[in-house]
Amino acid sequence: MKKLFLLAVASVGLLSLQAQRFKGNTVTERTKIGIHGGMSVAYLSYGSGYDGYGNYYSNNSDALVGGTYGIDIEMPLKNGWYLQPEVNYTNMGGKDWNTQTDNNNNSYSFKYRDALNYLQVPILIKYKPMLQGFGIYFGPQYGYLLSAKEHYYDGSPSQNVKASSIKNEFALVLGFEYYFPSANDGPSFGLGLRGVAGLTNNVNKDYLYNNFSNVGNIPSTRNNGIYLTAGVRF
């Protein structure tokens, strides 16, 4: 996993060396490297269906608050357009309730949270009308699952559920930012808000069907989230 992270960082760095530089009327365009971090509000969206205990899945889980941290490289293209690759570590997942029936036909409910940690690599296209300050961006995102645990609020031991999760996922990103202009082209500080919509299922259905009985119709599950971050670019 360390090698994968270093490879992602090196790839982003190589792209930055190839970025063009040019001068506008008032702003000198150049490649900028930034760091950012903040809060993630994640939730899971379910495809409809019933599990082996008669639970109906639909809509979304409750939100799970976590963090997101990473690096970004802002590379000028032309006329206010930029390419912005990033490498981020992000907490995803959600909270929900489950109901099960024991051998005596007694039903009981319990609350749990799925804590999913990802290495995320978005490749964003950004537009800044004034070449500084406000920017809006969009693009695809690749995610690699680093760890997956299910925690229970009744005090039961947590379970590692990485084997029942799909490690690779894809999503779409849409967001905006505002970085305060700095004097003499110095470091600039800013805020960002983005939404992430999962495109691919992250449940390993084959693993569950092959290793557990009475699981019923397993719904597809996708990661979604909203990130609020602060950062600095150099």
Image (cartoon, rainbow, N blue to C red):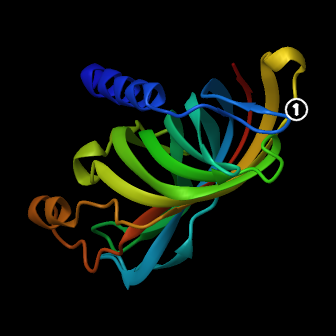
Residue under the point 33% across and 21% down: 6
Name the image quarter holding residue 53.
bottom left
Name the image quarter holding residue 101.
bottom left
Please name whichever residue, 128 or 122, is drawn nearer the observer in this view of the structure: 128
Residue under the point 80% across and 15% down: 186
How packed is label 1: few (under 14 Cα within 10 Å), some, or many (20 or more)? some
**Residue carrying label 1:** 180
Residue under the point 45% across and 25% down: 17
Q: Position of residue 227 (x, y in %)?
A: 67, 47
- Amino acid type, label 1: Phe
**Residue 117 visible to an observer of this rendering:** no
Label 1 element class? loop
Q: Position of residue 116 (x, y in %)?
A: 44, 43
**Residue 8 visible to an observer of this rendering:** yes
Q: In the picture, which quadrant includes the N terminus?
A: top left
Q: Image check: 121 left or right of 162?
A: right
Please name whichever residue, 12 or 222, is drawn nearer the observer in this view of the structure: 12
Q: Image check: 104 left or right of 141?
A: left
